[in-house]
Image (tube, coloured by chain):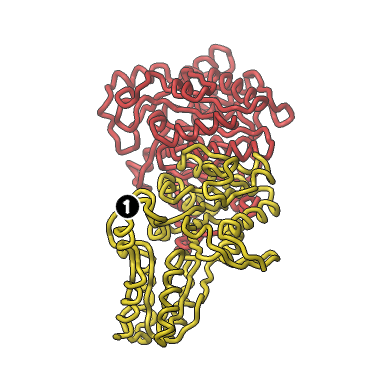
Amino acid sequence: MGSDRKSRNEEKSPRKTPDGDGNRGKFAPVTDDLLIAMYKEMLLYRRFEERVHVAYTTRRKFAGFCHLHIGQEALCVGVQRALLPSDYMITGYRSHTQAIAKGISPNAVMAELFGKIDGAVRGKGGSMHMFSKGKRFLGGHGIVGGQVPLAAGVGFSIKYRGEDDIIVCYLGDAAANQGQFFEALNMAATWKLPCLFIIENNRYGMGTDIRRTTSVDHLWKRALAFDMAHSQIDAYNVVDVYNHVGGIVADMRKNQAPHLFEAMTYRYRGHSVSDPGLYRTKDEVAKFQERDSIVTLGAQLKKKKLATDADLEAWDLEAKKTCEDAEAFADASPPPPEEEVWKDVFVD
Amino acid sequence: MALVTFREALGRAMNEEMARDQTVFLMGEEVAEYDGAYKVSKGLLAKYGPKRVWDAPISEGGFAGLGVGAAMTGLRPIIEMMTWNFGIQAFDQIINHAAKMLYMSGGQFNVPIVFRGPNGAAHMLAAQHSQSVEAMLTNVPGMKVVSVATPYDGCGLLKSAIRDNNPVIFLESEMMYGMKGEIPDEEYLIPLGVGDIKRPGAHVTMIAWNKMLHRAMEAAEKLASDGIEVEVIDPRTLQPLDEQLIFDSVRKTHRCVVVEESYDFASVGAQISDRVQRICFDDLDAPVVRVTSEFVPMPYAENLEDRVMPSQDRILAAVSEVLYA
């Protein structure tokens, strides 16, 4: 357990999910409170990324690559709510909101984007490399598909110790064409590792329509090659995501085995902030925005008398305030001192 | 003391560390039921069972990455590459993930992992089975690189590598697995980053590692009969390099030859040469001379392979050059 002893930046224990630790193997039905909480979280992630976009483009607070998650919030929230705090998560480079969902504060994520010492990884990772050992968030990775074998390793580690945690591994649609993806899925299936691989299929690998580079019409079919459990749903409805993933996770805890879940989603913005998105039509983007997951859930909350327009407005202001505070925090945080250059190359 | 083969010495190191620490496991192609392609892991499956000794699919990038993920979450993997030529498949995981994880996670996730296997040319294995990888892997911050030449060093350094909290690249050789040497009966460790004087001498410092150490020793033996005393230094760890041992020797002999299996361009020998000429400039009586492989893919034919690798003649010529003899 050498790596545990060496841990720094330990954070407070993660938020409890509704079912709590005492009821592992089951997941709670969606209550009204949970519905409201999920709405607020999606709203926060939307506002956070919008603020990040403006901070990058208009206010020029930072540079480098910056991949926004706008449009994909329902998946992020539905998945996180179906997990326990002790579950692990690893992802690619579109990682800001997943990091927040796993428990890294918006302040720490924003400060990291700004390259500040109070950032999630002390200003040494930036947009693509959010990590928290305490929250079991294992990054934040910039090599497309490179995180997938790592996830198999985490699954291996869980099984080695005989625990019932699971690892969620997010990857983009285009990562499903990377060789390491196939190698990792083969090992996970052969050795029955508790890995939930979630392909966030937002339909484009950077500017390339996934259909132009992929032999199968649905990416869940990749699982067939490994005799692996698989599924696909429209990931625009947070309740559907929660129920779907909750079911998978509950089963995985009991019967350790991997699962490939293709989540159909869509990003409203470009691949990164510098991408104008000329490879797709405005109509296509508008078609997805028409059934926006946040707007839809807001209307549903009103219909169910769980919220008024005034509530939605207040929650929106609250989310915006959190993001505004995060930017202020990031502004106020100093840049990393020069000695950070040589720190953490090796550990004793 | 016991007289053991190199493969037995390496196997003993893994055996002792697996007995000592339950989080240590071994994974690689043919390491379990086949007892290892070169029998380095012989007996480990029988002793520790399939939970600790894993036959991997032919997926070097995949199982290297699996090791990294396991190392990030509390285990200490030993990942065997059947040869480092196949290990090149895993360079993405080794370089982009294992070596950089601690730094890019702001010091949160260290990766205690050993990637080990035979490096460089064996005998008539041609271009795709003869690469020396140390020049490439020592050029990446965040991991240590060990290259061993004797059973004694192999056992002591592999144990330290397994206990190290950072990624360690461990370079062996197919040609040396059957070589015998004495190792103590009791447990011992050799720290990483500490070189060794394999033969003391006053006239020329010769630095060599892995298989080339033995060619250097043979050349030194021959030169001794001519009255030339060569001090042979085995750095044993190439990253970090025990520079002080080299500088101290050069300050004594004033002459330096580096013998390495890698190519001459941007190699470990080039680095040593740069450091010696920079730090020991006033002590040198001659420019540092390097003996390396010819800068070509490895040919198959025996005579051509011999011509590519550093030969005793070329080593002797290098010594003559630094002695102006």
Q: Nearer the viewer, residue A186 or A141?
A: A186
Q: Nearer the viewer, residue B164 or B180?
A: B180
Q: Residue at x 46, y 64 (%)?
A: B210
Locate residue A104, reporting x and y percent: 55, 42
Q: Nearer the viewer, residue B87 or A88?
A: B87
Left or right: A113 in relation to B53: left
Locate residue A107, reporting x and y percent: 51, 44
Compared to residue B142, the image places residue A131 above or below, namely above
Q: Residue at x 59, y 22 (%)?
A: A248
Compared to residue B24, the image places residue A264 above or below, namely above
Q: Residue at x 54, y 32 (%)?
A: A188
Q: Chain of mark 1?
A: B
Corner quadrant of residue B154: bottom right
Locate residue B125, reporting x and y percent: 38, 51
Quadrant assignment for the C terminus of chain A: bottom right
The residue sitting at the top extreme is A303
| Chain corresponding to yellow in the figure | B
* Crowding near the residue tagged with mark 1, few <14, some 14–19, many ≥20 C-alpha atoms within 10 Å: some
Give the color of chain A as drawn: red
Q: Secondary structure at mark 1?
A: loop
The reply to whether residue A333 is in sight is no
**Dot 1 amino acid type:** Tyr
The residue sitting at the left extreme is A278
The reply to whether residue B114 is in sight is yes
Compared to residue A240, the image places residue A41 above or below, namely below
Residue at mark 1? B300
